[in-house]
Image (spheres, rainbow, N blue to C red):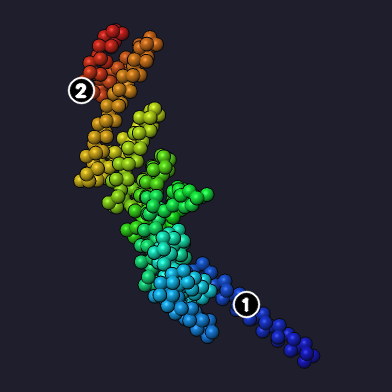
Amino acid sequence: MKLKTAISLLSISLSAVFVSLSSSCSKNVDQPLAATGMVQGLNSQTAATIFAKAKDHQASGQTKAAIKAYQTVADKYPLSSQAPEARYQEGSLLYAKGELLESFDAYQKFIENYNSSSLYSAAIQKQSEVALAAAKGDIKYNFVGLKSKLAGRSVETMLTKVRDNAPYSKQAPKAQFAIGTVWQDRGNTEKAIAGYRGVQERYPNSSLTPEALYRSGSILMKQAAKGNRNKASLDSARNVFLDLQQQYPSHPRAKDAKAKLLELSKSDVQRSFDIAEFYQKKQQNASAAFYYREVIRMSSAGSLREKAQSRLSEIGQ
C-alpha cells in the first residue's frame, strides 16, 4: 500500500514538472529574444569571454576571426547581454569587408530578435543602405567567374524586408520606390507600375510619391507608343497624371504632368482621325462621320480639325 502511494505521488510530481516545462517552452515562441543577460553561470562567462576575444580580434585588424567570434556569441548565446552587439558587429564587419549580402542577413537577424536594443535604428539604416545598393546594381554575384546584377526577385525581397521592418521610418518609402525602379530597369513594366503605385498607396505624404506617379504614368504612355495602343492603358495614364496634378499641384512634376496630359489629348485626336479614315476607306460613312466629329469636338484648331471638317463634307455629313 505504501509503495503504491509513493509511486502515485511520484507520477503526479513528474506530470507537474512536464506541464511546467511545456508551458515555459511554448510561451512567447514568436516573440523577439530579450537579451537580458539572464543565462546560467558558465554560459554567461563563456559568452563574455568569446565576446572579449572578438573585440580584441577587431581591434588588431583580424576581421575574419572577429566575425567568427561575434557569430558564435550571437548564435550560441542569444540571450546573453553581449548577443545584440555581437550580431550588430557581425553585420558591420561584413559590411566593411564588402560582403553586403551576408551583412544584410546579419542585420535581419538582429532586427528580428533585438528590437529593444539601442543599436536597432542603426541596424535599420545599415540594412537599408545594403538593399538600396542592390537596387542600384552595385552588388554583384559571381556565377562561373562572371559578375552579374542580383535577380530582380532577390532585390525586391530585400527591399520588402527593409520596408516592413520599419514601415513608418524614412527608409520605408525609399525601399518601396526602389522596388519600382528595379523592375523598370529590368523592363518588367507591370511590376514597375505596381511598385510605384505602392508608394502612393502606402506613403501618400512622401516626397517620393509625385515622382512615383509620374513614372508610372510615363511607363503606360511608352507602352502605347510601342504599338500597344490600348485605350485602357492610355486612360490609366491620364488618370495618373490627373491625380498628380490635383494632389500635388505645387510639385515640379505637376507641370510635367500637365504637358503629358496635353500630349495624351493630341494622341486622342490623332487616334480618332485614324479610325475615321479607316471607316471611310471601308465606305462605312456613318461610323467615319462619328469619329470625324470626335476630332472636331476634341480640338479647337489645327490641321486635323480642318481635315475632319473637309472629310465630313466629302461624305455628305
Left or right, residue 145 beside residue 220: right
Residue 287 image point, x, y percent: 36, 15
Above or below, comparing residue 299 to residue 122 in the picture:
above
Q: Which mark is residue 279?
A: none
Q: Quadrant of residue 61?
A: bottom left
Circle 1 sits in a helix, a strand or a loop, which is it? Answer: helix
Q: Residues within 10 Å of mark 1 (few under 14, many from 20)?
A: few
Circle 2 sits in a helix, a strand or a loop, which is it? Answer: loop
Q: Which residue is drawn at the image coordinates 45% and 58% (left, top)?
A: 101
Above or below, comparing residue 316 to residue 135 in the picture:
above
Residue 236 visible in rendering: no
Residue 47 visible in rendering: yes
For badge 2, the amino acid type reads: Ser
For badge 1, the amino acid type reads: Val
| Marks 1 and 2 close (CB-CB < 8 Å) | no
Q: Residue furthest bottom?
A: 2
Q: Specify which label sits upstream in the sequence, 1 or 2.
A: 1
Q: Which mark is residue 19?
A: 1
Callout in the foreground (1, 2) = 2
Q: Quadrant of residue 239?
A: top left
Q: Quadrant of residue 238?
A: top left
Q: Which quadrant is home to the N terminus?
A: bottom right
**How far apart are the two marked residues, 1 and 2, measured between alpha carbons?**
84 Å
Left or right, residue 191 beside residue 297: right
Left or right, residue 68 beside residue 178: right
Q: Which quadrant is home to the C terminus?
A: top left
Q: Which mark is residue 300?
A: 2
Residue 86 image point, x, y percent: 44, 73
Residue 279 image point, x, y percent: 37, 14
Residue 133 image point, x, y percent: 38, 54
